[in-house]
Image (cartoon, rainbow, N blue to C red):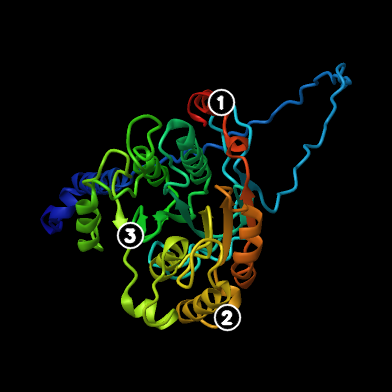
């Protein structure tokens, strides 16, 4: 029967080894799977919270101030409406004239910077010129510097010297926005300081001092600053050069001059044929025609116009002619017309009060001005000037 036994297959023969291989394969697959997994451990930290522990602090009671405190309200001074610039009669030295308050600003500076037009837009303080009072934004001073104010010896010359000094101090006190100009006159001559109005700056105020410094030296032999006896050629040359400034003059004249000649057409239109403005009214014509001020101050020793000399003349005709001239220049509104203020200096036999009231009265009234007289020039001198005046009087008065 041994021969009838069937032969065993390959797997039967190798059954144990096959099982081992299968087992190894399964383990290999498991190892590979195990290797392919990555273990990730996530550590989550909680946020740290800081808690403030309450701290007990001792309370200190408030103490009252040991030193009493007095609170006082600062007193405020009410603004003044105006101040006066006054030429003081008694001065121990050149007065310290404070800058006057500027009140009532009306909207800027306007258009009047020396061109004769517009308003500056501020209110000037009252100006006291040897007793004649007036207000203005654009001011012209017309001052006599002929033989009546500048004589032949130091005693007589103290009059012109005092007028010059007080005029310089008055101009030095003008506020900066003001416009001003000065003219000296006598008989048929009017010499202006500048062709146009000037702002009252420190530089322009110094020009006044420089311009007038040579006028009327107290010592020396000469006539007056308009004396033509030896310098007639120079005056003629100056007139021929008008309107150019002339600065080659004699030692007792202003440092330079701007000689004014009234055009013939002006004389004929407002005075009539054959008549001409002269003396103080020649200076006024210069001011109106070339400067257009709102205030004019005149210092004179007498009244002279185109119709007569001395203290007579014809004030009514002169005023009528000026009204026509001013209407042509300023317009019909009389509120815009300039004021004319007159100071009459006592000289010789003419009574200053009579001249002021009778001859200048119609002019002052027509142009809303003010008037005054100087009967004793020594009232306007400093103590030092008064001492000089007395000393000269003892030497030169007849």
Q: Position of residue 157 (x, y in %)?
A: 45, 37
Which class describes the residues within 10 Å of circle 1: few (<14), some (14-19), or many (20+)? Answer: few
Label 2, label 3: how many angstroms apart (C-alpha)?
Answer: 27 Å
Q: Is residue 120 above or below residue 153?
A: below
Mark 2 or 1, which is nearer the eye? Answer: 1
| Other-residue count near label 2 (Cα within 10 Å), few / some / many at <14 / 14–19 / ≥20 | few
Q: In this view of the protein, which residue sits in the foreground, 24 or 239?
A: 239
In the picture of the structure, the residue carrying the numbered disc 2 is 333
| Circle 1 residue | 390
Q: CA distance from mark 2 to mark 1?
A: 50 Å
> Label 3 near label 1: C-beta < 8 Å?
no
Horizontal placement of 240 versus 52: left or right?
Answer: left
- Whether residue 274 is visible, yes or no, is yes
SS of the residue under disc 2: loop
Residue at the disc numbered 3: 195
Q: Which quadrant is home to the N terminus?
A: bottom left
Q: Earlier in the sequence, mark 2 or mark 3?
A: 3
- On the image, the x and y values in percent for residue 171 come to 49, 46
User: Based on the displayed image, in which of its 4 quarters is residue 367 positioned?
Assistant: bottom right
User: Which of marks 1 and 2 precedes in the sequence?
Assistant: 2
Is residue 381 shown left or right of residue 188? right
């Amino acid at each position: 029967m041994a021969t009838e036994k069937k032969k065993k297959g390959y797997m039967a023969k190798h059954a144990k080894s096959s099982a081992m291989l299968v087992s190894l394969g399964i383990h290999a697959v498991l190892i590979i799977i195990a290797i392919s997994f990555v273990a990730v451990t996530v550590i989550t930290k909680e946020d740290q919270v800081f808690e403030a522990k309450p701290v007990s602090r001792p309370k200190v009671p408030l103490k009252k101030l040991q030193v009493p405190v007095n609170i006082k309200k600062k007193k405020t001074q009410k603004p003044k409406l105006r101040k006066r610039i006054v030429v003081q009669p008694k001065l121990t030295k050149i007065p310290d004239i404070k800058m006057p308050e500027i009140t009532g600003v009306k909207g800027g500076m306007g258009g009047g910077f020396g061109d004769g037009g517009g308003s500056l837009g501020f209110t000037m303080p009252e100006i006291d010129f040897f007793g004649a009072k007036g207000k203005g934004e654009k001011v012209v001073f017309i001052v006599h510097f002929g033989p009546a104010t500048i004589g032949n010896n130091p005693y007589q010359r103290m009059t012109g010297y005092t007028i010059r000094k007080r005029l310089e101090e008055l101009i030095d006190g003008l506020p900066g926005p003001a416009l001003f100009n000065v003219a000296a006159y006598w008989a048929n001559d009017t010499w202006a300081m500048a062709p146009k109005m000037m702002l009252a700056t420190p530089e322009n105020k110094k020009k006044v001092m420089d311009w007038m410094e040579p006028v009327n030296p107290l010592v020396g032999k000469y006539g007056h600053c308009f004396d033509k006896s030896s310098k007639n050629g120079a005056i003629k040359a100056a007139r021929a050069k008008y309107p150019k400034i002339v600065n080659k003059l004699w030692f007792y004249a202003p440092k330079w001059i701007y000689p004014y000649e009234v055009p013939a057409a002006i004389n004929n239109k407002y005075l009539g044929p054959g008549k001409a403005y002269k003396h103080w009214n020649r200076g006024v014509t210069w001011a109106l025609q070339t400067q257009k001020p709102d205030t004019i101050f005149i210092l004179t020793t007498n009244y002279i116009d185109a119709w007569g000399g001395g203290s007579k003349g014809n004030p009514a005709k002169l005023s009528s002619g000026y009204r026509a001239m001013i209407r042509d220049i300023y317009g019909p509104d009389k509120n815009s017309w300039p004021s004319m203020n007159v100071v009459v200096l006592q000289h010789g036999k003419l009574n200053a009060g009579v001249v002021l009231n009778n001859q200048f009265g119609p002019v002052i009234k027509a142009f809303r001005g003010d008037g005054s007289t100087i009967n004793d020039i020594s009232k306007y001198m400093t103590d030092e000037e008064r001492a000089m005046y007395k000393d000269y009087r003892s030497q030169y008065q007849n």
